[in-house]
Image (cartoon, helix red, strand yellow):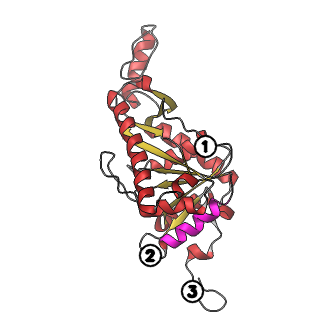
Amino acid sequence: MTKANGERSSPHRAGSSPVARRSPLIHRFMVSTFRRYFTRHMNALRIASWGLPAIPPTGPVIVYSNHPAWWDAAVYILAADRFLPSHESYAPIDAAMLKQYGVFGRIGAFGVDLESPRGAADFLKASAEILSAPNRALWVTAQGRFSDVRERPLGLKSGIVRLPELAPDCIVIPLAIEYGFWLERGAEAFLAFGKPMRGQDLLNLARPARLERLEIELTTTLDRLSADVQSRDPARFRSLLEGRSGVGGLYDGWRRMAAALRGRGFDPSHEGRPS
């Protein structure tokens, strides 16, 4: 793409801002789409009973998390819809991915060129616009790469410490995400929000100390969540979404028919018992 003066610009720069591109109508449609997709392919989305977020009545929100899997984007979308329904949510993604999945730009995603020296500047510019209004939230995978949940230290990218400087009135909340298989065919997605931090309090720390504080808070939340996941005790969680139990297909069809012939109810779950 070429400007009037002949200067060549990238499609990302020439496009409208993340705020201008976001469509509430398309966002609602995609939330519904991701909810159906999640329940088809995953067994459940669970949040730790202690990990419900404390959302402030006013001020922009920054949610930063670890980055264990491809499913994180779906978790962001579903969690934002459930816990921050009055906020417009945005998230940075790789610019190449946004080019491939352009509809994400219509629901709050904005591209960051991870290979370009200008990538960090573009990220901060877009973030400043997003955080300029009290009814917006920015969701960031602060590790900047896929990482195992057991990796320590987390290695958060230094750019996360700059965000409170853009909005001193913000609230910063760590989000721990983990996946695992329990009893069913599908995987379980687990999440927990940590202790919220005031942006102004973080600004009282020098950047290295600020990064250390953010890493400690997320690590603490991750460790506590992992202990609950390892317990395999559903009572420690609240179920936000549930998929289909059982094996499915012909096998469950046969089991259902056999139960009906015996006059019994059918529970397709692994621990299901005839009624």
Q: Are marks 1 and 2 in contact (CB under 8 Å)?
A: no
Horizontally, is 212 left or right of 31 in the view? Answer: left
Instruction: Examine the rendering and report whether any part of residue 73 can be seen.
Output: yes
Residue tagged 3:
8
Q: Secondary structure at mark 3?
A: loop
In this rendered view, identify the residue nearer to me: 9 or 226. Answer: 226
Which residue lies most toward the front here? 204
Q: Earlier in the sequence, mark 3 or mark 1?
A: 3
Instruction: Kindly identify the residue that appears in the image at 36 percent across and 55 percent down.
Output: 146
Question: Dot 2 surroundings within 10 Å: few (below 14), some, or many (20 or more)?
Answer: few
Q: Secondary structure at mark 2?
A: loop
Residue tagged 2:
116
**Is the magenta region chiefly helix, strand or loop?**
helix
Q: Earlier in the sequence, mark 1 or mark 2?
A: 1
Q: Does residue 263 belong to the magenta stretch?
A: no
How far separated are the C-alphas under marks 1 and 2? Answer: 32 Å
Front tag of 3 and 2: 2
Q: Earlier in the sequence, mark 3 or mark 2?
A: 3
What residue type is disc 1 on?
Answer: Asp
Quadrant in which the C terminus appears: top left
What residue type is disc 3 on?
Answer: Arg
Magenta residues (range):
120-132
Residue tagged 1:
81
How far separated are the C-alphas under marks 3 and 2? Answer: 16 Å
